[in-house]
Image: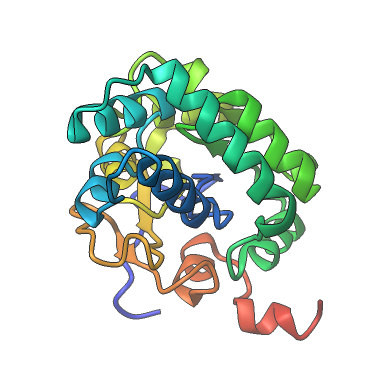
């Protein structure tokens, strides 16, 4: 397909970000943040959202505290936020458009899949259990598995090791600027898939910016039949 950068090496595996890429959890996080801050007389602004998106949970909460000069501790905010989020997950968790079709295409082609997120292990495991998608992934990496979170490249270097590949042999799907920075710094084939929460982010170094997980360019880069072809067989 014209206009798509070709990988330096054949792509052998895929790594997914979690929040906002696989599931609508970024939207839920925004609702949680708005609720927490409203209780303290503050707004959850776009500026704050851009500062925290893609970061490890404890670092995101610390940024929130500093941004608004809150007296709360990270642990206290984390507990309050988790309580609000738990209630939302039960009725509002949804896969992002094209996720299930892309996973099916990768599975049919025998392309191994992993997840690399800045969210805690407990949250990652719960979302995968609720969605029934745990078995689709060879491994999952959460915030506890690395010392330096995104935008540092550590999580994607570890993902490449888990896949038994060179970093340039894995395609990484990311929705945020910070996450994409990590994928680019790791020398992966980084593809940005922004949503409504990150549509105004910049993605320097990304191989291309996909419209969604349904974007035919993702399929083409991996040598898969396109989403639209597969949809007729699902």
Camera-nearest residue between 98 and 208: 98
Q: Is residue 181 left or right of residue 76?
A: left
> Is there any visible trace of residue 137 in the rendered image?
no
Quarter of the picture holding the N terminus? bottom left
Q: Is residue 187 left or right of residue 213?
A: left
Camera-nearest residue between 20 and 166: 20
Q: Measuring 19% from the left and 34% from the top, which residue is drawn there?
A: 67
How many marks the image carries: the answer is 0
> Is there any visible trace of residue 117 in the rendered image?
yes
**Percent position of residue 126, x then y:** 71, 35
**Above or below, 150 relative to 191:** above
Quarter of the picture holding the C terminus? bottom right
**Above or below, 60 relative to 221:** above
**Percent position of residue 10, x then y:** 47, 50
Residue furthest to the top in view is: 147
Q: Measuring 31% from the left and 50% from the top, which residue is drawn there?
A: 44
**Percent position of residue 12, x then y:** 55, 45
Q: Measuring 34% from the left and 41% from the top, which residue is drawn there?
A: 183
């Amino acid at each position: 397909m014209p206009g798509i950068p070709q990988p330096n090496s054949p792509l052998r595996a895929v790594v997914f970000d979690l929040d906002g890429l696989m599931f609508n959890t970024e939207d839920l996080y925004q609702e949680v943040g708005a609720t927490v801050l409203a209780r303290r007389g503050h707004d959850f602004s776009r500026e704050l959202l851009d500062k925290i998106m893609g970061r490890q949970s404890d670092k995101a909460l610390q940024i929130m505290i500093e941004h608004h000069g809150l007296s709360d501790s990270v642990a206290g905010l984390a507990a309050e936020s988790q309580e609000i989020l738990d209630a939302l997950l039960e009725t509002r968790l949804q896969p992002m458009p094209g996720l299930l079709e892309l996973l099916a295409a990768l599975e049919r082609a025998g392309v191994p899949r992993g997840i690399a997120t800045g969210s805690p292990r407990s949250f990652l495991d719960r979302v995968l259990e609720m969605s029934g998608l745990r078995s689709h992934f060879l491994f999952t990496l959460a915030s506890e598995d690395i010392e330096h979170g995104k935008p540092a490249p550590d999580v994607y270097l570890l993902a490449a090791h888990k896949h038994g590949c060179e970093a340039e042999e894995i395609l990484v799907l990311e929705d945020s600027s910070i996450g994409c920075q990590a994928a680019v710094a790791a020398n992966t084939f980084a593809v940005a898939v922004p949503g409504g929460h990150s549509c105004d982010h910049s993605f320097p170094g990304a191989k291309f910016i996909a419209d969604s997980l349904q974007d035919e360019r993702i399929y083409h880069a991996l040598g898969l039949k396109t989403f639209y072809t597969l949809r007729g067989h699902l």
